[in-house]
Image: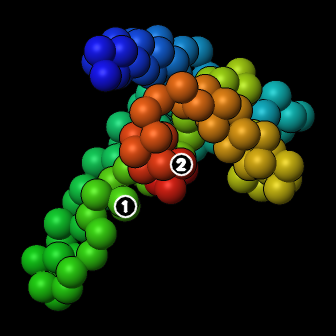
Amino acid sequence: MSKYPNLLTQGLLKIWMLQSKFSEIIRWNTSLNKPGGKVLRRQTCTEHVLSVEFTARFVTDTYTNLTKAMIDRELILDAFHFHDYGEPLKGRDVVATIKQDTDDRDEYLAFMDFIKDLPEPILLKYQRAF
């Protein structure tokens, strides 16, 4: 039991270290590198995750307030938050128009390998969200 807090601290530090790599991943870089490639705006992975997470919060707040429906808000927010964590682990972003099933699988497997040492309840929560 005494190792549990240490594992949590190590897991938290590991995730913080990964987040520091998000700024190195430029979204839609593959589009920019094509002849005539255009993109609405360059965006780091950090900017993308934050904007998507804000959008998820806004949508779930609005939906819940308008419909009074019960939704798993925590799952939705976690999914929006963690959906790109595989990108800095793989060192790239693959634009959706050329992304293949193997790209998503590779990012998922990299993420699962990255979190494998977290305590099981946290690992399962993050796995479900991704």
| Residue at 36% across, 15% down | 3
Residue 89, located in which quarter of the rendered image?
Answer: top right
- In this rendering, position of residue 69 left or right of residue 39: left
Looking at this view, is 36 or 115 the one in front? 115
| Label 1: few (<14), some (14–19) or many (≥20) C-alpha neighbours in 10 Å | some
Looking at this view, is 8 or 64 the one in front? 8
Looking at this view, is 47 or 42 the one in front? 47
Mark 1, residue position: 76
The x and y percentages for residue 113 are 67, 30
Q: Which mark is residue 127?
A: 2
The x and y percentages for residue 30 are 78, 34
Residue 64, located in which quarter of the rendered image?
Answer: bottom left
Give the residue type at disc 2.
Gln
- In this rendering, position of residue 97 left or right of residue 81: right
Q: Is 114 rendered above or below residue 24?
A: below
Regarding mark 1 in the picture, which secondary structure is present there? Answer: helix
| Residue at 10% across, 77% down | 65
Q: Is residue 3 visible?
A: yes
Badge 2 or badge 1: first in the primary sequence: 1
| Residue at 28% across, 57% down | 74
